[in-house]
Amino acid sequence: MIYAIIEASGKQIWIQPGCFYDINKINAKPGETIQFKKALLINNNQAITIGNPYISNINITGKVLKHLRGRKITIFKMKPKKNVRQKNGHRQELSRILIQAIKTDNNLNN
């Protein structure tokens, strides 16, 4: 089983080829292929490589499936004894990414 831990949009994500993940919105159109260069760890059938802080010779390709919005979060602020109440909502912009392959120069194929 091959998997990797990458850093994408400020978060660390555990990924596998053939699976899709929702990350913060990136500037790419649906259908475009993107590269992830910041890999922290890769496991290829029990051969674990750990970066310091990143692995230099890695090529992770993904495809943008679509852009979507996350579920709504309600923010409620209140100041007691002042009759101040403020209710806001927020929906995070997300991109759905399909991981196509995880490869390195050491011939770690998907």
Image (cartoon, rainbow, N blue to C red):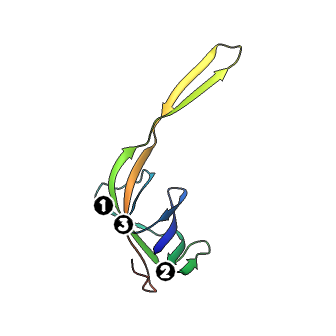
In percent of the image, x 61 and y 25: which residue is there?
77
Determine whether 21 is above or below 88 in the image.
Answer: below
Q: Amino acid at mark 2?
A: Asn
Specify the label residue 44 is tagged with: none
For numbered disc 2, what is the local secondary structure? loop
The tag earlier along the polypeptide, 2 or 1, is: 1
Q: Are discs 3 and 1 less than 8 Å apart at CB?
A: no
> Residue 58: x, y in percent?
46, 77
Nearest-to-viewer mark from 2 and 1: 2
Specify the label residue 45 is tagged with: 2
Determine whether 80 is above or below 47 in the image.
Answer: above
Separation of disc 2 and disc 1 at Cα? 29 Å
| Of residues 108 and 92, the one drawn nearer to the viewer in this rendering | 108
Is residue 85 in view? yes
| Of residues 106 and 20, the one drawn nearer to the viewer in this rendering | 20
In percent of the image, x 54 and y 24: which residue is there?
87
| Of residues 59 and 101, the one drawn nearer to the viewer in this rendering | 101
Q: Amino acid at mark 1?
A: Glu
> Residue 10: x, y in percent?
54, 56
| Of residues 38 and 107, the one drawn nearer to the viewer in this rendering | 107
Pointer 3 residue: 18
In percent of the image, x 50 and y 56: which residue is there?
9
Separation of disc 3 and disc 1 at Cα? 16 Å
For numbered disc 3, what is the local secondary structure? loop
